[in-house]
Amino acid sequence: MNVPRDDSPVPPAAPGSAAVVLDALRSVYDPCCRERGISIVDMGLVRSIEVEEGRSRVELLLTSGWCPFASRMLSEARQVVEALPAAGEVSIEVVWSEPWTMDRVSAEARSKLRFLPDPGQVTDRDSYVQGHLGRPGPHGGDG
């Protein structure tokens, strides 16, 4: 099962299916996004899931090859999948040949990550910045 990149609901599935594994992985967080409640699924880090013949295989992408939390995230993913009744032998692998990009992030995660307005909504950048910094503009006035 290639994991969809949109927010499409996943239909209920039989135990031991890729959809069950995907749902379980929603409880695993990239440590950098845990405080915002963004799972590795919503971050688009789950590339694919295969469940067949007593074996569950999950491929993950990393936001950066230098991620200091990669081993922790991989361990948590393994624990969650191993806890599933029909998981069987579990393999969690990092895919190094494909880069993670922002287009993999779900709309919900995108909204949680956005702390600035869409650039198209800001007609005067300098006034916006000064208004949110709470200090006088570069020319001594209020803007």
Image: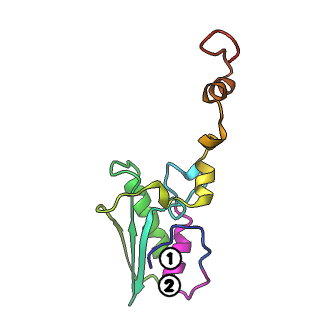
Please name the residue that numbered disc 1 is placed on: 21
Q: Is residue 27 magenta?
A: yes
Q: What's the magenta region? A: 11-28
Q: Is residue 73 above or below residue 11?
A: above
Q: Which mark is residue 71?
A: none
Which residue is located at x 52 percent, y 65 percent?
41
Label 2 residue SS: loop
* Measured Cα–Cα span from mark 1 to mark 2: 7 Å
Q: Which residue does the image show at 62% across and 42% down from the upper left?
A: 120
Q: Residue at x 52, y 69 (%)?
A: 25
Give the camera-side residue of 43 and 121.
121
Q: Amino acid at mark 1?
A: Val
Q: Which residue is mark 2?
A: 17
Locate residue 108, reporting x and y percent: 62, 58
Question: Around disc 2, counting alpha carbons within 10 Å, would you say few (fewer than 14), some (14 to 19), or many (20 or more)?
Answer: some
Nearer to me, 104 or 81: 104
Residue 125 vertical position relative to residue 70 in the rendered view, above or below: above
Whether residue 136 is in magenta: the answer is no
